[in-house]
Amino acid sequence: MATSGTTIFDLQIDELIEEAFERCGMQMTNGNQLKSARRSLNLMFLEWANRGLNLWTIELATANLTVGQTEVVLDTDTVNVLSAVIRDLSQSPPVDIVIDRISRAEYLHIPDKTTQARPAQLYVERTNVPKVYLYPAPNATNLYQLRYYRIKRMDDAGDYYNTADVNFRFLPCLSAGLAYYLSLKYTPERTQALKGIYEEEFARAAAEDRDTASVYFVPAVMGY
């Protein structure tokens, strides 16, 4: 038997909403239900940011540093910084040097935050305007570059003819989750069953959406 030969299946926002309503055992009858469903979808995207890593939302960002600079303002759609290095541009080829992430308290307790050298530590401030604070401050302009992997917010649903900002593996989870959210409003008798399906779908997709590189643990040998 012949197959389609394509692997481009996706769902527009209005199709996702239609699927979710059908899972609730109902049909959309007015525009208010459509707007309500899109609002629930956007709220669910924010919930996913709280659940942890979504690999398709991770991207590499860079910031050129100037002398004495103690903070870097990040894009407002930054959820968190996963890891960072300082690229030393004075060497050929440039060398990336690991920079340690410290806590708010550790950064607060640094006596002189204006000390200048190659940055070796950073504190990530996760506010509405996220920032990275560096210590020491760079001792030259255009000598160092901050390179970091960040988790960014998923795009809003937007127009109904858009597709969702998710990897294809999460489409079943997305449909199940939206059905659960809508059941809270329209069919509470189905909420418990739909929530169970949603959590199963999310767990299955999240287990696949991970870095599969090998990890090695080496025990420390303590001297006596």
Image (cartoon, helix red, strand yellow):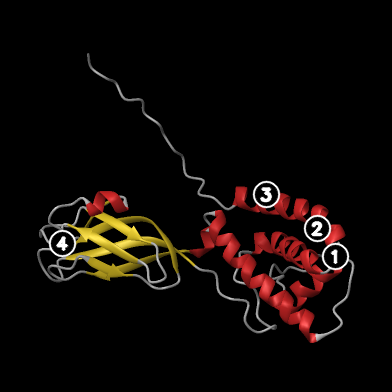
Number of residues whose C-alpha sits closer than 10 Å to that of mark 1, classed few (under 14), some (14–19) or many (20 or more): some
List the residue tagged with mark 3: 204
List the residue tagged with mark 2: 191
- Looking at the image, is mark 1 or mark 4 nearer the viewer? 1
42 versus 133 height, above or below? below
Q: Quadrant of residue 155?
A: bottom right
Mark nearer the N terminus (3 vs 4) = 4
Mark 2–mark 4 Cα distance, whole angstroms, equals 53 Å
Mark 1–mark 2 Cα distance, whole angstroms, equals 7 Å
Mark nearer the N terminus (1 vs 4) = 4
Mark 3–mark 1 Cα distance, whole angstroms, equals 25 Å
Q: Quadrant of residue 113?
A: bottom left
The quarter of the image holding the C terminus is top left
Residue sitting nearer the eye, 60 or 71: 71
Q: Secondary structure at mark 1?
A: loop
- Looking at the image, is mark 2 or mark 4 nearer the viewer? 2
Q: Secondary structure at mark 4?
A: loop
- Looking at the image, is mark 3 or mark 2 nearer the viewer? 2
Residue 134 picture location, percent across and down: 23, 60
Identity of the residue drawn at 40% across and 66% down: 127
Q: Which mark is residue 187?
A: 1
* Name of the residue lying farthest toward the top: 224
Q: Secondary structure at mark 3?
A: helix
Query: What type is the residue that disc 1 sits on?
Result: Thr
Residue 27 picture location, percent across and down: 88, 75
Query: What type is the residue that disc 4 sits on?
Result: Ala
Residue sitting nearer the eye, 64 or 34: 34
